[in-house]
């Protein structure tokens, strides 16, 4: 009886000297200071050598086959062999996921602007500019945020038969703006489109310093004679340089001027009308006329414009924001060797906005659409985001134009 009393008393004393802390459902465990981390984020290894319960993939073998690979590896003892074909059957959604760190919650808010997803890839046949994949994060409520695997994410621009690193900045996922909770990330997802086969290894989160938007200094015009020759004496020295040629932009208080030299083996072919003139030879320019607009905005404002200059057909100029063909426009063009030249003179009044003002800076993106001999667009060349589409919807993808 006395022994029992002493045990009860000892239990009360120990309990009275103890403190208890509530553990959050998604709380990350304390980590030693010497463990690799980025700004205090320690869960940087997503897949390295171990094929565990953290990895899952679609279970239709005719659509997706994922296997652990021990021969074709980038480093270590293991990699992943991936083959997919979305058209092979009634596949629906196909892909794979990684609930790394034993499916615990990951707080990406610590590294949203200072890190990137990195993985190494190697094709089993041929080569690929980017991958027909979407990469996404999912939180514990099922909300998701996605990005593509475009050519500008690939070191060297092409994935071939040697191991190539792919880097996708976390900035691309817009974790600050999406519905997803970046403090409770459950898993990393890969969604497969089209078909292909690769080896994949070393999926990690790495430090990354985002590259800012490109900048262009524009001299105001003292008047352009539109003859289709872009004479150097009339146009400013600065140019928007693209892989297919150059585009020049200048302005005065009455007109916006756009000119260029473009390499084109099938010039001046565009059989479209109105909003569809992008689907053929054309030049597009998206820009702001409000110097105070937030450069990180994700939607167009009323002061933002997106115009297309048709290089073929009826040579019209279309403004997608207003949904109309612009009037009072002059376009001249010429051909020399394998290049086409053009000049366009567009009244500010037709755009219903105020002209650019000296000393201010504005958002801008310039693109060239090149069509095939049958007239349909084959490729779009862009200035600020050459490997990433979407400037026609998202002004945060634009560069910066400063008016001198």
Image (cartoon, grey):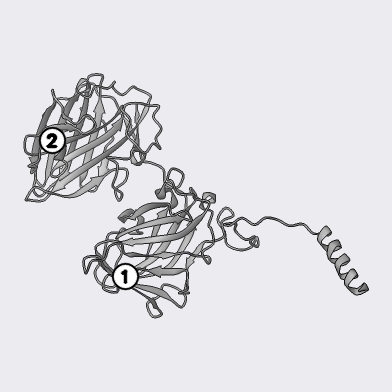
Farthest residue, direction bottom: 71
Q: Are marks 2 and 1 in contact (CB under 8 Å)?
A: no
Q: Closer to us: mark 2 or mark 1?
A: 2
Q: Residues within 10 Å of mark 1 (few under 14, many from 20)?
A: some
User: Is the N terminus in the top left, top right, bottom left or bottom right quadrant?
Assistant: bottom right
Q: Nearer the viewer, residue 200 or 84?
A: 84
Picture mark count: 2
Q: Is residue 327 above or below residue 97?
A: above
Judging from the image, what secondary structure is the residue with disc 1 in?
Answer: strand
Residue 198 has which mark? 1
- The numbered mark, 2 or 1, whose residue comes first in the sequence reads 1
Please indicate whether residue 51 sits to the left or right of residue 382 in the image: right
Q: Nearer the viewer, residue 153 or 107?
A: 107
Q: Name the residue: 34% across, 64% down.
A: 95
Residue 385 placed where, x, y %? 32, 46
Q: Residues within 10 Å of mark 2 (few under 14, many from 20)?
A: some
**Residue annotated with mark 2:** 274
Residue 263 placed where, x, y %? 15, 46
Residue 228 placed where, x, y %? 12, 32
Q: Name the residue: 29% across, 44% down.
A: 390
Q: Quadrant of residue 382?
A: top left
Residue 272 placed where, x, y %? 9, 40
Q: Name the residue: 23% across, 46% down.
A: 381
Q: Quadrant of residue 190?
A: bottom left
Estimate the spatial distance between the alpha carbons at disc 2 and disc 1, rounded to whole Å: 41 Å
């Amino acid at each position: 009886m006395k022994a029992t009393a002493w045990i009860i008393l000892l239990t009360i004393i120990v309990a009275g000297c103890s403190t208890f802390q509530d553990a959050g459902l998604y709380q990350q465990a304390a980590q030693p200071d010497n463990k690799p981390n980025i700004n205090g984020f320690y869960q940087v290894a997503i897949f390295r050598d171990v094929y565990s319960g953290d990895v899952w993939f679609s279970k239709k073998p005719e659509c997706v086959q994922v296997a652990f690979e021990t021969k074709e590896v980038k480093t270590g003892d293991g990699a992943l062999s991936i083959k997919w074909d979305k058209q092979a059957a009634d596949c629906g959604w196909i892909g794979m996921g990684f609930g790394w760190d034993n499916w615990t919650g990951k707080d990406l808010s610590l590294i949203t602007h200072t890190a990137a997803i990195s993985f190494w890839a190697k094709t089993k046949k041929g080569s690929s500019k980017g991958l027909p994949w979407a990469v996404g994060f999912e939180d514990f409520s099922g909300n998701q945020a996605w990005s593509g695997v475009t050519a500008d994410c690939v070191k060297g621009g092409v994935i071939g038969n040697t191991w190539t690193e792919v880097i996708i900045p976390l900035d691309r996922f817009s974790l600050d703006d999406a519905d997803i909770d970046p403090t409770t990330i459950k898993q990393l997802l890969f969604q497969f489109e089209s078909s292909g086969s690769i080896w994949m290894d070393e999926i990690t989160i790495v430090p990354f310093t985002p590259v800012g938007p490109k900048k262009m200094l524009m001299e105001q015009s003292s008047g352009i004679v539109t003859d289709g020759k872009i004479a150097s004496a009339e146009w400013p020295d600065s140019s928007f340089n693209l892989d297919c040629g150059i585009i020049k932009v200048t302005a005065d208080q009455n007109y916006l001027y756009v000119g260029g030299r473009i390499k084109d083996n099938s010039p001046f072919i565009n059989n479209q009308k109105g909003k569809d003139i992008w689907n053929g030879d054309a030049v597009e320019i998206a820009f702001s006329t409000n110097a105070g607009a937030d450069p990180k905005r994700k939607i167009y404002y009323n002061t933002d414009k997106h115009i297309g200059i048709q290089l073929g057909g009826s040579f019209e100029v279309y403004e997608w924001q207003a949904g109309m063909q612009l009037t009072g426009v002059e376009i001249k063009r010429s051909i020399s060797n394998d290049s086409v030249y053009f000049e366009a003179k567009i009244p500010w009044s037709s755009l219903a906005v105020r002209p650019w003002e000296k000393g201010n800076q504005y958002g801008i993106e310039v693109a060239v659409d090149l069509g095939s001999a049958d007239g349909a667009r084959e490729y779009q060349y862009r200035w600020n985001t050459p490997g990433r589409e979407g400037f026609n919807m998202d002004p945060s993808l634009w560069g910066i134009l400063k008016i001198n």
